């Protein structure tokens, strides 16, 4: 094996290739979120990454491959749901349980913000992104249903798990957080306090007629 061949397989080359891939993915995420997945071209990604279009294809793949690589990395992150559920079960009363839910769902919103922004920008034009969003919504509702079951079994709320789940989803689901933070410009602290307080008011108030 000659020196040129050894250089081609060197650790430095592998490191540079990984750095290029990371740069392309980071740049693509920024473009997808700011401009929308459908409007961004491979040429846009290459230009913003300061590499050739061929390099983008070689380092990640086609545009759909870029999106799916980003989503795969995001979904691999861990959720705070199990911690929040333990805190709900240990809470001495309903107000403390709802405060735990507010804190736990806030932590997930902050951790997964890049994923949520990316999904919102791409799911209307990419079927896999839309399916991932559907799965994320289902997982969130399942976690809140588990919290609702505990609140009902502990006698802290009316014994209607479906209704309690719907209330928890309304206050602590993905759409509520996004509406307050992204669309209304609230701080996470203000949103967490407001959601916990108004969930408590709703769940302790009279049932709708």
Image (cartoon, rainbow, N blue to C red):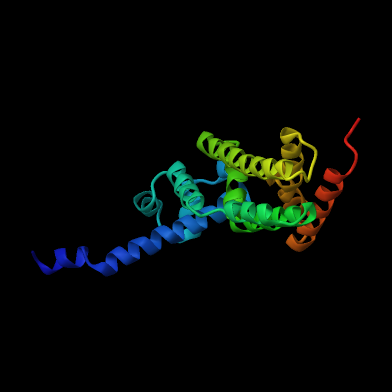
Looking at the rendered image, the quarter that the N terminus falls into is bottom left
Identify the residue shown where x is 71% and y is 56%.
91
Identify the residue shown where x is 34% and y is 66%.
16
Tell me if I can see residue 21 in this picture.
yes
Residue 36 location, x and y as percent? 60, 45
Identify the residue shown where x is 66% and y is 43%.
144
Residue 73 location, x and y as percent? 46, 52
Tell me if I can see residue 181 in this picture.
no
Left or right of 182 in this view: 80: left
Total label count?
0
Looking at the image, which residue sits at the far left?
1
Left or right of 55 in this view: 95: right
Residue 136 location, x and y as percent? 58, 42
Residue 30 location, x and y as percent? 57, 56
Looking at the image, which residue sits at the far front?
154
**In the figure, residue 202 lies in which quadrant?**
top right
Looking at the image, which residue sits at the far top?
209
**In the figure, residue 114 lies in which quadrant?**
bottom right
Looking at the rendered image, the quarter that the C terminus falls into is top right
> In front here: 52 or 84?
84
Identify the residue shown where x is 9% and y is 66%.
2
Question: Is 88 above or below relative to 19?
Answer: above
Left or right of 180 in this view: 62: left
């Amino acid at each position: 094996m000659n020196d040129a061949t050894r250089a081609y397989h060197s650790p430095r080359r592998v490191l540079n290739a990984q750095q290029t891939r990371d740069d392309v993915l980071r740049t693509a995420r920024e473009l997808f979120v700011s401009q929308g997945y459908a409007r961004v071209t491979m040429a846009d990604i290459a230009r913003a990454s300061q590499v050739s279009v061929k390099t983008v294809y070689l380092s990640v793949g086609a545009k759909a491959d870029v999106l799916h690589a980003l989503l795969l990395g995001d979904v691999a992150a861990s959720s705070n749901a199990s911690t929040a559920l333990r805190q709900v079960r240990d809470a001495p009363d309903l107000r403390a349980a709802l405060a735990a839910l507010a804190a736990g769902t806030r932590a997930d919103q902050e951790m997964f913000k890049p994923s949520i922004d990316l999904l919102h920008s791409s799911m209307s034009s990419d079927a896999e992104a839309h399916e991932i969003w559907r799965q994320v919504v289902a997982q969130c509702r399942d976690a809140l249903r588990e919290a609702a079951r505990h609140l009902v079994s502990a006698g802290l709320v009316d014994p209607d798990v479906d209704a309690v789940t719907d209330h928890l989803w309304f206050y602590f689901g993905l759409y509520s957080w996004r509406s307050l933070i992204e669309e209304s410009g609230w701080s996470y602290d203000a949103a967490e306090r407001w959601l916990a307080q108004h969930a408590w008011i709703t769940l302790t108030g009279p049932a709708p007629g």
